[in-house]
């Protein structure tokens, strides 16, 4: 059994608090369940093969971009540039917010973290005049309770990383998501079961990856696998919606209540 060091204990407590504080809980009272496909950091391959796979499945994707890293090389391949972002937006995909330089909430103070979010949102407004991202994804190690309230006040929904789907209700301030990355995708049987349960119980499954290639990085997904899992979701009866669209439907259904 691994030892509970003071650091591990603090981290575990912080993650627990993040789940239970500053929630915006909405019931999943829609008539049919949904799946959302998100691409973090958005390499060029996500804008190309990834977007194609989502369109083939009959929906639109959500891209969480760090605009300070546009066109830069990364472990997932070269990241999308201004033209990729503009084109995705004009085709109907959602552009969501990440931090400008991809700092995460665990590696800097809250002020630095929030400043990086503001810078990213401002850069979006420069890239696409008048545009502001409405949903956010916490980079790398995810959310911390001390910054959750500030982040939540800026966005209609924020995605964390707990790897499961939503059933009965969802905290729009800390959405869960299942990564399809080669290095951390669930076993196929478990993912099939999760998709079937999400459809049956009218839940919401958010999927994520980075690059989409025939030779993906450990953080990416093979294009054949992405097509396969999206097809499974749609054939099971899930609607393929952007995170913004799904969260808007849920908020409208829930009225103004639910905040704690
Ligand atoms: Zn990221």
Image (cartoon, rainbow, N blue to C red):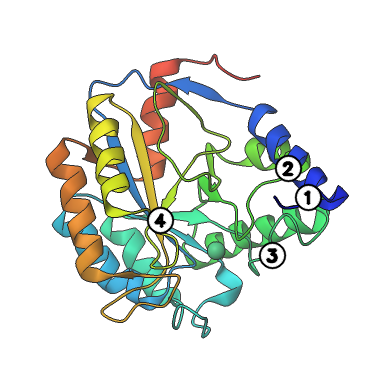
- Badge 1: few (under 14), some or many (20 or more) residues near its Cα, within 10 Å? few
Residue 119 point in image, percent of width and height: 67, 62
Alpha-carbon span between mark 1 and mark 4: 26 Å
Residue 24 point in image, percent of width and height: 57, 26
- Badge 3: few (under 14), some or many (20 or more) residues near its Cα, within 10 Å? some
| Closer mark to the observer between disc 1 and disc 3 | 1
At horizontal 78% and vertical 51% (from top left) the residue drawn is 3
Q: Quadrant of the C terminus?
A: top right
Q: Which mark is residue 12?
A: 2
Q: Earlier in the sequence, mark 2 or mark 4?
A: 2
Q: Are marks 3 and 2 in contact (CB under 8 Å)?
A: no
Alpha-carbon span between mark 2 and mark 4: 24 Å
> Disc 1 marks which residue?
8
**232 is higher (above) or lower (below) than 211:** above
Alpha-carbon span between mark 1 and mark 2: 6 Å
Q: Earlier in the sequence, mark 3 or mark 2?
A: 2
Q: Earlier in the sequence, mark 3 or mark 4?
A: 3
Q: Which mark is residue 208?
A: 4
Q: Are marks 3 and 4 in contact (CB under 8 Å)?
A: no
Alpha-carbon span between mark 1 and mark 3: 21 Å
Residue 154 point in image, percent of width and height: 63, 41
At horizontal 35% and vertical 59% (from top left) the residue drawn is 89
Q: Residue furthest right?
A: 6
- Ligand 1 within 8 Å of the CB at mark 4: no
- Badge 2: few (under 14), some or many (20 or more) residues near its Cα, within 10 Å? few
**15 is higher (above) or lower (below) than 69:** above
Q: Earlier in the sequence, mark 1 or mark 4?
A: 1
Image quarter for ligand 1: bottom right
């Amino acid at each position: 059994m691994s030892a509970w060091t003071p650091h591990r204990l603090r981290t575990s407590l912080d993650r627990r608090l993040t789940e239970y504080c500053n929630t915006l809980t909405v019931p999943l009272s829609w008539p049919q369940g949904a799946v959302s496909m998100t691409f973090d950091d958005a390499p060029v391959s996500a804008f190309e093969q990834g977007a194609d796979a989502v369109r083939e499945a009959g929906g639109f994707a959500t891209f969480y971009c760090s605009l300070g890293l546009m066109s830069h090389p990364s472990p997932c391949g070269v990241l999308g540039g201004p033209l990729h972002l503009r084109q995705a937006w004009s085709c109907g995909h959602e552009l969501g917010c990440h931090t400008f330089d991809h700092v995460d909430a665990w590696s800097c103070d809250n002020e630095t973290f929030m400043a990086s979010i503001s810078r990213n949102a401002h850069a979006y407004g420069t890239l696409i005049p008048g545009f502001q991202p409405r949903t956010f994804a916490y980079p790398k190690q995810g959310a911390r309770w001390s910054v959750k309230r500030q982040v939540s006040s800026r966005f209609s929904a924020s995605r964390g990383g707990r790897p499961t789907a939503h059933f009965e209700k969802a905290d729009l301030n800390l959405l869960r998501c299942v990564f399809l990355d080669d290095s951390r995708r669930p076993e196929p049987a478990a993912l099939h079961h999760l998709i079937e349960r999400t459809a049956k119980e009218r839940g919401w499954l958010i999927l994520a990856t980075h690059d989409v290639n025939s030779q993906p990085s450990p953080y990416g997904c093979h294009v054949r696998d992405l097509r396969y899992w999206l097809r499974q979701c749609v054939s099971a009866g899930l609607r393929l919606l952007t995170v913004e669209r799904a969260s808007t439907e849920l908020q409208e259904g829930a009225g103004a209540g639910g905040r704690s």
